[in-house]
Image (cartoon, grey):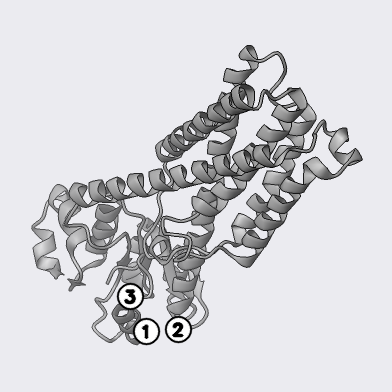
Amino acid sequence: MLTGDDLGKLKDEALWHKAPRTDLFVEIDPQQKERIVRALQRSGHSVGYLGDGINDAPALHAADVGISVEEAVDVARESADIILLRRDLDVLRTGVEDGRRTFANTLKYISITTSANFGNMVSMALATPLLPFLPLAAKQILLNNFLSDVPSIAISSDNVDPERVSRPQRWSIKDIQRFMVVFGLISSVFDLVTFAVLLLVFHADEATFQTSWFIVSLLTELAVVLVLRTHRTALRSRPSRLLLWTTLAVAVATLAIPFLGPLSSLFGFVPLSAPEMGTVIAIVVATSRRRKGRRHGSTGRKSERNRKKDPGRRFPAGALDLTSGGRGTLAPQIRQGCAERLSNDIRC
């Protein structure tokens, strides 16, 4: 707890350190409310502030998200970004959770798609100068991209793990680049193994080589969508029905493509023998297991670094005003929302 008198004695630098670790601010004047909001912003938080009085206007204006109610004074409503038509903080929680789910699924799509494309690009660049033919023809690449995009579209409907909804996710280009490079290169390593097996063991011609790598590349992408969509094991985190069934449908279509006669010939595919198909499937399984193992390892190290970096940080950003002492129109709803921790973006 931090009182207005104590806060007035703190310099801005001290408040930057103190504010994120304070649960309750009491007897705070309007200027001090604004100082708290800016201190939380200065320490890296995105701040939401809820208020309905004239003295809340500076803090509402300074916050990243200002929240007020329909019964609030005019200046508070004009300063707010969100006006609650009902006295219910649950709508804020729902909005925050929906936003975090959307953001988490967006990150899934970007990470998985960029890593797959990067891996395929590296494999093509390495194999093309060494082979007397192209690893994949242009029409085969287009078909690969089309089929792999079908389940990727369904990622928007995917289930999100509770731990990814319980705290804000940050947009980090470095994390996406690291994900793309690490998992893309893992895919390229197994692609090179595939090339070696096809050429040295099966002595594959152009059509057989292209058919085999098309299946390996596409099935690996489909498996990766299900494997890398969560930090948990497959049994503990189920994908949405739309994502699961579209992935399975495309996987079945991929395995059937070499055996569709005239349609296969149109794209330059040929039927594979049982040993060749078995080897292709084994490589896909090995690639998926290796990527999942790497994902668990990198996730564990990242969590440990975050705990060491800031062990005292308990709550994410936000500021919720409780200084009315029961006299404001929002006091009962604020206390209820505070007690239930309706949103990790609201600080009590």
Residue ID for mark 1? 333
Residue ID for mark 3? 341
Number of labels in the image equals 3
Q: How crowded is mark 3: few (under 14 residues within 10 Å), some or many (20 or more)?
A: some
Q: Which amino acid does label 2 sit on?
A: Arg
| Residue 321 position within the rendered picture, expressed as x and y whole percent measured from the top left | 29, 72
Q: Which amino acid does label 3 sit on?
A: Arg
Q: Residue 87 carries which label?
A: 2
To which quarter of the image does residue 220 belong? top right
Question: In the visual, does 248 lie left or right of 139?
Answer: left
Q: Is residue 292 above or below residue 3?
A: above
Instruction: Choose between 27 and 115: the one closer to the eye.
Output: 115
Q: Is residue 330 visible?
A: yes
Instruction: Choose between 26 and 236: the one closer to the eye.
Output: 236
Q: In this view, does 95 lie above or below 264?
A: below
Q: Residue furthest right?
A: 262
What's the distance in space between the residues labelled 3 and 1, CA to CA? Answer: 12 Å
What's the distance in space between the residues labelled 1 and 2, CA to CA? Answer: 7 Å
Q: Is residue 121 visible?
A: no
Q: Which mark is residue 39?
A: none
Secondary structure at badge 2 equals loop
